Image: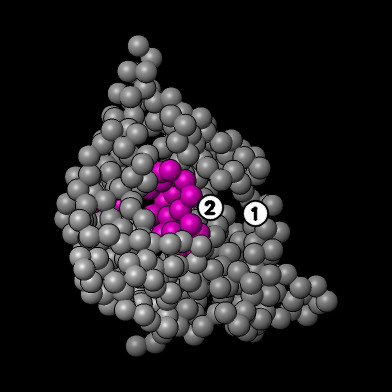
Amino acid sequence: MTEKSWDEIFNKFIEREDDQITPSRFFDILEEISEAKIKRTIELKAKLVEGKLEFEPTPEVVVKGNEILFGENRIVVNLE
Amino acid sequence: MSEIQIILSENVTTEQCRAVRLYLDDVNQLSSRDWRTALEGFDSLRSSVVCIDSEKFTFEMFYKLFVEQRYTDQFIQRIYNEPNLEQTGRRIQASTAREILHRLSEEGLYGRHIANSEYLASYLLYWWAAFAKGYLFELSIFRDLESAGIQFVAHDIRTRRGRLSPSDLFVEGLAGDIKNTTYFLYSSRSFPLTNDFYITRLYDEKQRKYLPIVIIKPAAWQFINGDVLPCSFQEAANFLPQTVQVDFEGEGLVVVDYNVWKQKTLSKQRRQRR
């Protein structure tokens, strides 16, 4: 089969209606976009020490007891 | 005869070129990953360069000169009071797109003889379609909100300055944007979603028609007094038209049927008027 020429592609595109994006396709694309923006996943391990959560040190992110220091944020994780 | 050269930005990948071509050719063939890559491609093409003799223009600058300055005000003027918005608007959009392609060809900026000219044409035609289809949808929503009796303040789409405002409308102090589906997806990939809500639409294959939806930040939805069903992206399509909440880039996004949103907004406005 011969490949379509750009002229054919453009002529078809020009006449095309608005893209018909179904709900399932829409959410799939949104998920794809959302995941692609997350550049990397950092896994943290924690244990319970005297009823309090304690993160294991990791070179990828600064942790201190039950706190994660992330940019200008301090995330404190408490158990209920 | 001018000397013309088209140089693709180093950000443009072979994969993006393939996805852009596939998007323009047959949108139904795109996987979700292809979709993302095509949207990335249109973004990356922006900084590619058209050299005409000693002058250089990025694709973005060239769009402004070759398309925006010539066609956008005129298009809005022609559709603004047009009763048969969809049909007439689509006809003008398509005839303008044909003219853009013809002019590119006439001026030696598109054709087999000039390398990468297909990507310049792709860029211009994509953004022209995004502009025209986007404003046709936006105008149809403005008209619908007016006829429903919803009070809102809209930006003036008849001026470039008005069109460049960060929000298209304000309802109850909430900032909103109206985007056709493709451009909503493009924006959600390229920019932070800064408005309180976005009106867009999805295509219902069974009913063969577009169903408008509102994507709204949870705090804004609470303000309108709505319930949500938190769910994953995979579940969301099955739960619609129930109001669902998905997690997008660590932030909640509520997806609500447009008519439900309208009804709740109208009720709130009526209660406030009493």
In front of the other: B260 or B3: B260
- Image check: B263 left or right of A38? left
Q: How is the image coloured?
A: one colour
B195 part of magenta stretch: yes
- Image check: A43 left or right of B21? left
Q: Position of residue B206 (x, y in %)?
A: 18, 52
Magenta part of the protein: which range?
A: B178-204
- At horizontal 57% and vertical 54% (from top left) the residue drawn is B96
Is residue B91 visible to the viewer in this orientation of the structure?
no
User: Label 1 lies in what chain?
Assistant: B
Quadrant placement of the N terminus of chain A: bottom left
Quadrant of residue B250 within the rendered picture: bottom left
- Above or below residue A2? Residue B161 is above
Choose the circle earlier in sequence order: 2 or 1: 1
- At horizontal 51% and vertical 50% (from top left) the residue drawn is B132
Q: Which residue is mark 2?
A: B131
Q: Which residue is mark 1?
A: B68
A64 part of magenta stretch: no
Q: Position of residue A63 (x, y in %)?
A: 39, 73
- Above or below residue B254? Residue A6 is below
In front of the other: B227 or B107: B227
Per the image, label 1 sits on a secondary structure element best described as: helix
**Residue type for callout 1:** Glu
Crowd band around label 2 with a 10 angstrom C-alpha radius: few (<14), some (14–19), many (20+): some
- Above or below residue B173? Residue A57 is below
Q: Label 2 vs label 1: CA separation?
A: 9 Å
Q: Are marks 2 and 1 on the same chain?
A: yes
Q: Position of residue B145 (x, y in %)?
A: 39, 30
Crowd band around label 1 with a 10 angstrom C-alpha radius: few (<14), some (14–19), many (20+): some
Please identify the residue farthest to the top as the structure is shown. B274
